[in-house]
Image (spheres, rainbow, N blue to C red):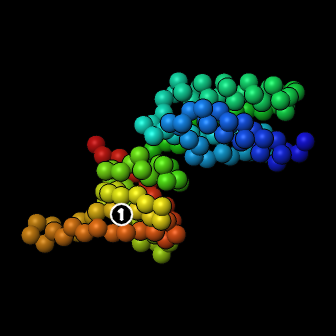
Amino acid sequence: MADLEKAALIEQLLDEILSDETEYFKVKFKVKPTHNFKIYIDGDNGITIDKCIKINRALYKKIEEQQLYPEGDFSLEVSSPGVDEPLVNIRQYKKNIGRKVEVLLNDETKNEGTLLEVAESGITIEHSTGKGKKLVTEQLNCSFDNIKSTIVQIQF
């Protein structure tokens, strides 16, 4: 079986595991040439390290049962995407409603504001410009087609 076929099968096995875990979802599935599988998972209410470990073990077991790498010549990393990673799917956007985000548009325009709404076609953020009496708050609609990246801004 070719490497691409193996990777597709492993991703399918992951999807089967996650189908039993409706709160959790795949964000990214990456494969390096050294059979290193990096899987990023998130949850509607976040994800714990323990949950990542359980998913990792379940997937590892399924890979071994399928005898995809009889010599154990693969590695598997399951983690959350991390705070500095851009949002990539609608479920991530929805779980971050009410948080500050930085939206980079395709024309390189940056907009910071509070994520207000998420629809199938895009998002709405509320952002302010100016200070004091000249403070203007407005809502900006951004279609997903026009968004290059969206990163949650950590508030301290």
Q: Provide residue 112's location: percent of width, then percent of height.
A: 34, 62
* Relative to 70, 27 lies left or right: left
Q: As displayed, is residue 21 above or below residue 110?
A: above
Residue furthest to the left: 133
Q: Provide residue 79's location: percent of width, then percent of height.
A: 57, 35
Q: Quadrant of the C terminus?
A: top left
Q: Provide residue 24's location: percent of width, then percent of height.
A: 53, 37
Crowdedness of circle 1 by 10 Å Cα count: few (<14), some, many (20+)? some
Front one among 16 and 131: 16
Instruction: Name the secondary structure under disc 1.
Output: strand
**Amino acid residing under circle 1:** Thr
Q: Provide residue 17's location: percent of width, then percent of height.
A: 65, 33
The answer to which quarter of the image holds residue 58 is top right
The answer to which quarter of the image holds residue 113 is bottom left
* Relative to 83, 2 lies left or right: right
Residue furthest to the bottom: 107
Q: As displayed, is residue 119 above or below residue 133?
A: above
Q: Residue at x 69, y 30 (%)?
A: 59
- Is any part of residue 153 visible from this angle? no
Query: How many numbered callouts?
Result: 1
Q: As displayed, is residue 152 above or below residue 80?
A: below
* Relative to 10, 3 lies left or right: right
* Residue holding disc 1: 124
- Is any part of residue 29 visible from this angle? yes
Q: Residue at x 16, y 68 (%)?
A: 135
Q: Residue at x 48, y 49 (%)?
A: 91
Q: Residue at x 53, y 43 (%)?
A: 81
